[in-house]
Image (spheres, helix red, strand yellow):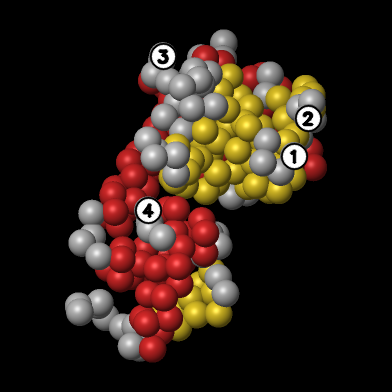
């Protein structure tokens, strides 16, 4: 499928971009001017289309403006493992672009019809001639988003190092609950995706979720969850 791309006329997407952490503290007019200055491009992807491949060099910071994207790795046994899911307003490619030459450890594909904004990293980090306040703020935001990626990775590792599936599930759901700040929350992964994220068998995951519900640790309906218990000691 031919990927469509165009010079960035992002007025219809500015509301989404203004919610993005990269543009925190930047107003609508400033953002519109910055996107023009960077030569940002909007690219449209069909469901399952590759945004960039594992082992490719990444030169752009990418923002999901509609739809979603998913990063995954293929293990030596051929199993595809989901690393993360990027929803509307998410930023990715920033760490790789900043690394100057390190190849992508993941393949990123679109989930559904997805629109993504590509900003060349070299332009993003090059201050304009006026050294304006908005660009200084953008650099602060970029540094903050990269730091946030560290903590996201820490959360993932914290799940994977748990000794059994129940603790992995509970750790993931407890973290999602705290991040939402709500008793009842939705997760962005279906059962197959959650199994991949936790590096678990899908059938085993479904059985363990049912057991945790029966034991009063959690309640759920489809992708809506509530954490009930204070821990998952077996």
Q: Residue at x 57, y 11 (%)?
A: 129
Q: Nearer the viewer, mark 3 or mark 4?
A: 4
Q: Does the residue at mark 4 contact the one at mark 1 (Cβ under 8 Å)?
A: no
Residue 93 placed where, x, y %? Answer: 50, 30
The residue singled out by tag 1 in the image is 46
4 or 1: tag closer to the N-terminus: 1
3 or 4: tag closer to the N-terminus: 3
Circle 2: element type: loop
Disc 2 from disc 1: Cα separation = 8 Å
Q: Does the residue at mark 1 contact the one at mark 3 (Cβ under 8 Å)?
A: no
Residue 211 placed where, x, y %? Answer: 37, 82
Q: Nearer the viewer, mark 4 or mark 1?
A: 4
Q: Nearer the viewer, residue 41 or 227?
A: 227
Report crowding for label 1: few under 14, some 14 to 19, many 20 or more residues within 10 A (C-alpha): some
Quarter holding residue 63? top right
Circle 4: element type: loop
Circle 3: element type: loop
The residue singled out by tag 4 in the image is 199
Rendered position, 175 above or below 63 = below
Q: Does the residue at mark 2 contact the one at mark 1 (Cβ under 8 Å)?
A: yes
Q: Residue at x 37, y 63 (%)?
A: 172
Q: Nearer the viewer, residue 182 or 107?
A: 107
Mark number, residue 71: none
Q: Is residue 98 left or right of residue 66?
A: left
Q: Nearer the viewer, residue 128 or 169?
A: 169
């Amino acid at each position: 499928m031919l990927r469509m791309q165009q010079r960035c006329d992002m007025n219809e997407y500015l509301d989404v971009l203004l919610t993005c952490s990269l543009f925190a503290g930047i107003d609508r007019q400033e953002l519109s001017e910055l996107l023009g200055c960077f030569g940002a491009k909007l690219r449209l992807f069909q469901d399952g289309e590759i945004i960039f491949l594992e082992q490719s060099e990444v030169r752009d910071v990418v923002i999901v403006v509609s739809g979603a994207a998913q990063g995954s790795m293929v293990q030596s046994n051929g199993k595809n493992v989901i690393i993360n899911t990027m929803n509307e307003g998410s930023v990715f490619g920033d760490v790789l672009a900043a690394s100057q030459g390190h190849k992508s450890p993941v393949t990123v594909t679109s989930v559904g019809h997805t629109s993504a904004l590509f900003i060349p990293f070299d332009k993003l980090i090059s201050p304009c001639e006026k050294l304006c306040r908005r660009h200084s703020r953008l650099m602060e935001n970029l540094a903050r988003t990269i730091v946030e990626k560290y903590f996201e990775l820490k959360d993932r590792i914290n799940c994977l190092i748990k000794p059994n599936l129940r603790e992995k599930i509970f750790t993931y759901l407890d973290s999602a609950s705290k991040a939402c700040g709500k008793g009842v929350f939705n997760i962005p992964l279906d059962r197959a995706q959650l199994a991949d994220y936790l590096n678990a068998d899908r059938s085993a995951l479904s059985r363990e979720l049912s057991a945790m519900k029966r034991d009063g640790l959690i309640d759920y309906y489809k992708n809506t969850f509530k954490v009930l218990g204070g821990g998952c000691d077996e």
